[in-house]
Image (tube, rainbow, N blue to C red):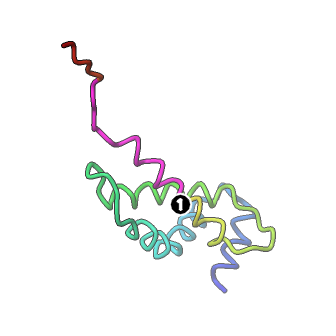
Amino acid sequence: MLRQKLFKDFFKNKKNLEIRNQLIELHLPLLKKLAYHFKYYPKVLTKEDLYQEGILGLIKALNNYQDLGYDFIAYATPTIKKATHLQFPKKQTNYRPKTKLYL
């Protein structure tokens, strides 16, 4: 009930940061579940890094969501996963220089 009211108020004025922050806090359990669900991730990343990127994905999902009859969680889950997956190649520091063996 509270979630639906917050979404209605947020759709009226998407620049209202107080309502957006309440929606973010309301969806933090989903974010924790998704961010801490990764079994394999690069060693240079911590789970907190994934959690922070998930928050950015959640904010992006909130800003782009339109109420077309489906649940916000169904829209936000792939957006959050994409935000966390995009960090994998960026943070890897494995550098393999090209080497040729001249014999």
Total of numbered circles in the picture? 1
Question: Where does the N terminus fall, quadrant-wise?
Answer: bottom right
Between 95 and 3, which is closer to the camera in this rendering?
Answer: 95
Magenta-colored stretch includes residue 103: no
Q: Which residue is mark 1?
A: 80
Between 25 and 98, which is closer to the camera in this rendering?
Answer: 98
The region drawn magenta spans 81-97
Q: Residue furthest top?
A: 102
Binning the other alpha carbons within 10 Å of mark 1 as few (below 14), some (14 to 19) or many (20 upward) gives many
Magenta-colored stretch includes residue 84: yes
Is residue 5 depicted above or below 67 in this figure? below
Is residue 83 depicted above or below 66 in this figure? above
Tag 1 secondary structure? helix
* Three-letter code, disc 1: Ile
Question: Where does the C terminus fall, quadrant-wise?
Answer: top left
Q: Where residue 93 sits: x, y (%)?
A: 28, 38
